[in-house]
Image: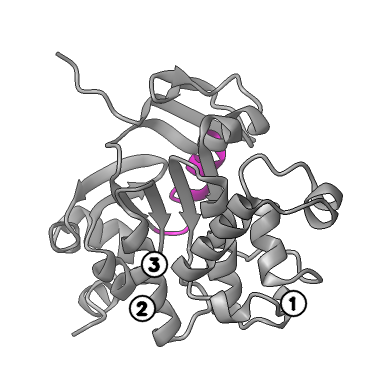
């Protein structure tokens, strides 16, 4: 009997002006899993997330979420299916408070005007403060989001995703631009969400990837090069060659040494 995955991609290809960004990609994700995707620039990581979320459509192949094809659905339809995405650059409502940002992210929110000026139910209020506790911003609830530090904005955007209650969370380079302390706290946050949500994290920071201690998928030229633990992929000769381009191999892929 064939195993059921929450997300599958089979034979997926996508070209842009003759450049094959995704090339016969096969990818399988278990429900509740925290998966990290790494790879050099141009490997197809963000394009893969674009295909999952309907921002672009594959030329060939199939992508299914919980057994349902997504490639002919709109971005909004895919969002309604239970897939949420956080981009690398934080996108928050800077002029609204942290509390209001989470309110706007709540599942079923009907737009800025109705969300901000409508009545907040006790259940919604409880949900907002639960999310604020998870992202460690409860004490910042009434501060304008634009006044937050970079790392805090990243956490707020993750909180806005959590508020949507997606089954699958797609998180693109969450540690980019963070301090070491912020990076470690971001790792703790994602680990706390794993299991309750299925999560894909794209990341370049190998120390951060090691903190997540999850299964790692390495993309190269739009295809899966290898998968396994971080130690397994770090010591894979093919990964060392393509990921590091024969330059400073050991130091770059073993930054903790």
Residue range corresponding to the magenta coloring: 40-51
Q: Is residue 19 rendered to the left or right of residue 180?
A: right
63 above or below 202? above
**Could you tell me residue 64's position as x and y percent?**
42, 24
Which quarter of the image is occupied by the C terminus?
bottom left
Q: Residue at x 55, y 55 (%)?
A: 127
From the image, state whether disc 2 or disc 3 is nearer to you: 3
Residue 107 coordinates in the image, percent (x, y): 61, 43
92 and 124: which is toward the camera = 124
Could you tell me if the residues under marks 2 and 1 are in contact, i.e. CB atoms within 8 Å? no
Sort mark 2 into few (<14), some (14-19) or many (20+) by Cα contacts within 10 Å.
some
Looking at the rendered structure, the secondary structure element under dot 1 is loop
The residue under label 2 is 184
Q: Secondary structure at mark 3?
A: helix
Query: Across the whole image, how many numbered discs are drawn on residues?
Result: 3
Badge 3 or badge 1: first in the primary sequence: 1
Q: Position of residue 189 (x, y in %)?
A: 39, 67
* Category of crowding for the residue at label 3, using alpha-carbon neighbours closer than 10 angstroms: few (below 14), some (14–19), many (at least 20): some
**Residue under numbered circle 1:** 144
Question: Image quadrant of residue 30?
Answer: top left
Kindly identify which numbered label has been placed on residue 189: 3
Which disc, if any, is residue 235? none
Q: Percent position (x, y) of residue 74?
A: 66, 27
Q: Residue furthest front?
A: 122
**97 left or right, relative to 113:** left
Quarter of the image for residue 102 reads bottom right
User: What is the quadrant of the N terminus in the image?
Assistant: top left
Between residues 116 and 40, which one lies in front from this camera angle? 116
Label 2: element kind: helix
């Amino acid at each position: 009997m064939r195993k059921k995955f929450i997300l599958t991609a089979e034979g997926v290809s996508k070209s842009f002006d003759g450049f094959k960004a995704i090339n016969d990609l096969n990818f399988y994700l278990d429900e509740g899993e925290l998966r990290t995707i790494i790879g050099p620039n141009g490997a197809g990581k963000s394009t893969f997330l674009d295909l999952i979320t309907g921002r672009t459509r594959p030329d060939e192949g199939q992508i299914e979420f919980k057994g349902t094809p997504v490639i002919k659905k709109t971005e909004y339809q895919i969002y309604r299916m239970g897939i949420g995405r956080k981009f690398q650059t934080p996108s928050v409502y800077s002029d609204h408070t942290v509390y209001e940002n989470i309110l706007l992210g709540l599942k079923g929110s009907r737009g800025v005007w109705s969300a901000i000026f409508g009545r907040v139910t006790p259940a919604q209020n409880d949900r907002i403060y639960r999310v604020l506790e998870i992202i460690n911003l409860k004490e910042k609830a009434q501060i304008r989001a634009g006044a937050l530090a970079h790392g805090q904005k990243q956490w707020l955007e993750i909180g806005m995703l959590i508020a949507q209650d997606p089954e699958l969370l797609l998180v693109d380079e969450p540690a980019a631009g963070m301090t070491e302390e912020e990076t470690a706290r971001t790792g703790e946050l994602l680990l706390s969400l794993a299991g309750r949500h299925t999560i894909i994290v794209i990341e370049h920071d190998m120390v951060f990837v090691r903190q997540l201690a999850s299964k790692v998928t390495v993309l190269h030229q739009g295809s899966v090069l290898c998968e396994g633990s971080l130690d397994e992929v770090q010591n894979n000769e093919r990964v060392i060659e393509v990921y590091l381009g024969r330059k400073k191999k050991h130091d770059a892929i073993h930054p903790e040494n």
